[in-house]
Image: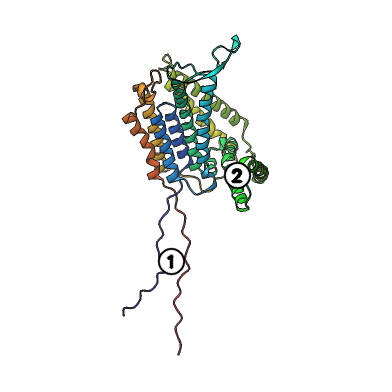
């Protein structure tokens, strides 16, 4: 018989190289660009395609962390927004005229100072469709923001901020992580109540879950405050007054320049000076932020790198937003289907192909694989001694 091959030691097996985590700013730019594209159309087919694109990328790229599970909560919030918009259209009426009446509700007369508002009356198909299109646009925007919350690590995003924005960034990150932490606490407590055979749904379950969630939020805030105090949060370096005045002047002047340049680009009269003023304002604001970072005494451990994958992810979202803005100017009827007269929305081909560019992050930056448990090393059997 042929001898058995010697077992391979696990240490000698080459492990696949893991890609480093993507820069969180790239995920936020990608999601905000998709949200910008959603605001440029009311076509339900395009909006559904945008939602499906963000859902596929989240399902493919999000890591296995507690804060990455907040996407479902944003989807539920988006459904609530659509429902509220429809309820308002039925109860308060709409300025959209319609001929296809569904039901006629009893109308409550209002005083003269409430002109333009009615309670009850006719409910038409055109009114409901207009409200649904409008609510779906806002829902798509919320879902795109939820995708950023699920894909980008808040702590790594805070680490990437410039020093001048660090304190404001801490407040923003704490506010952004409130919803994911709250959802994780509710899921954990509901699972514990189910294991104990206690109700976790309905009003009774909500009351029994709400108090521990509030207590956990207070304990987490106290622990966060103690950690920030022990790390010297709020310390500032001794910067000369001249540098402080220069920083304030550059930052304030740069922001005013950005506002003036943006206003010039949006108006026909300011088309000549809008772009130069905007660029000068951006340069001044960035210089002010650079100087303002000298007051922040902090170091970065393993700073996030902006690599080629980050450029591809951010660029794919920017391409979707730019092409949808161009399509809204070139073919507004396709991106904003009318409801009077009542027509079925159609899917424009090249705007739909532009939305599909947002799927690029699913192939560029897939989710990191969880490490498999290591098997114990195989030891050779002891030799028999005569």
* 312 sits to left or right of 232: left
Q: How many marks?
A: 2
Q: Is residue 129 visible?
A: yes
Q: Residue at left 34%, top 78%?
A: 3
Q: Residues within 10 Å of mark 2 (few under 14, many from 20)?
A: some
Query: Looking at the image, do the residues carrying marks 2 and 1 touch, with CB atoms under 8 Å apart?
Result: no
Marks 2, 1: nearer the viewer? 2
- Which residue appears at 48% of the width and 61% of the height? 373
Picture layout, residue 334 above or below residue 204: above
**SS class of the residue under badge 2?**
helix
Measure the alpha-carbon separation of dots 2 and 1. 41 Å
Q: Position of residue 95 (x, y in %)?
A: 48, 16
Q: Please provide percent x and percent y for residue 183.
A: 57, 42
Residue at screen point 62% across, 47% down: 199
Q: Position of residue 57 (x, y in %)?
A: 42, 42
Labelled disc at residue 10: 1
Residue 119 in view: no
Binning the other alpha carbons within 10 Å of mark 1 as few (below 14), some (14 to 19) or many (20 upward) gives few
Quarter of the image that includes the N terminus: bottom left
Q: Which mark is residue 186?
A: 2
The residue closer to the viewer here, 275 or 84, is 84
Give coordinates of residue 203: x percent, y percent: 64, 39
Of mark 2 and mark 1, the one earlier in the sequence is: 1
Outermost residue on the bottom side: it is: 386
Indicate the colouring scheme: rainbow
Q: Nearer the viewer, residue 20 or 336?
A: 336
Quadrant in the picture for residue 239: top right
The quadrant the C terminus occupies is bottom left
**Which disc number belongs to residue 42?**
none
Secondary structure found at label 1: helix
Q: In which image quadrant can residue 321 be found?
A: top left
* In the image, residue 332 above or below residue 151: above
């Amino acid at each position: 018989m042929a001898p058995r091959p010697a077992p391979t030691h696990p240490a000698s097996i080459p492990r696949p190289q893991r890609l480093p985590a993507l820069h969180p700013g790239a995920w936020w730019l990608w999601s905000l660009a998709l949200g910008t594209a959603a605001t440029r159309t009311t076509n339900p087919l395009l909006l559904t395609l945008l939602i499906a694109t963000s859902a596929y990328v989240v399902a493919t790229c999000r890591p296995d962390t507690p804060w990455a599970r907040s996407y479902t909560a944003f989807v539920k919030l988006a459904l609530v927004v659509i429902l509220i918009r429809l309820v308002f259209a039925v109860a308060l009426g709409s300025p959209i005229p319609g001929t296809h009446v569904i039901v006629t509700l009893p109308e409550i007369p209002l005083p003269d100072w409430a002109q333009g508002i009615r309670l009850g009356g006719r409910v038409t198909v055109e009114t409901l469709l207009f409200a649904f299109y409008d609510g779906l646009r806002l829902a798509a925007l919320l879902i795109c923001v939820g995708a950023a919350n699920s894909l980008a690590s808040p702590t790594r995003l805070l680490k990437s901020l410039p020093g001048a924005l660090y304190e404001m960034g801490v407040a923003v990150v704490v506010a952004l992580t409130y919803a994911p932490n709250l959802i994780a606490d509710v899921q954990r407590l509901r699972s514990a109540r189910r294991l104990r055979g206690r109700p976790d749904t309905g009003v009774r379950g909500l009351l029994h879950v709400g108090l521990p969630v509030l207590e956990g939020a207070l304990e987490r805030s106290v622990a966060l405050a103690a950690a920030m105090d022990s790390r010297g949060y709020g310390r500032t370096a001794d910067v000369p007054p001249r540098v402080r005045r220069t920083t304030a002047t550059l930052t304030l002047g740069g922001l005013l320049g950005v506002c003036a340049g943006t206003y010039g680009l949006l108006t026909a009269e300011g088309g000549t000076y809008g772009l130069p003023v905007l660029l000068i304002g951006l340069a001044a604001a960035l210089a002010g932020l650079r100087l303002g970072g000298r007051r922040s005494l902090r170091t970065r451990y393993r700073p996030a790198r902006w690599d080629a994958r980050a450029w591809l992810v951010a660029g794919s979202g920017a391409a979707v937003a730019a092409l949808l803005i161009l399509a809204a100017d070139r073919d507004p009827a396709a991106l904003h289907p009318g409801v009077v007269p009542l027509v079925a929305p159609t899917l424009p081909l090249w705007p739909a192909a532009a939305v599909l560019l947002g799927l690029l992050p699913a192939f560029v930056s897939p989710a990191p694989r969880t490490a498999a448990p290591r098997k114990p090393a195989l030891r050779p059997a002891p030799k028999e001694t005569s």
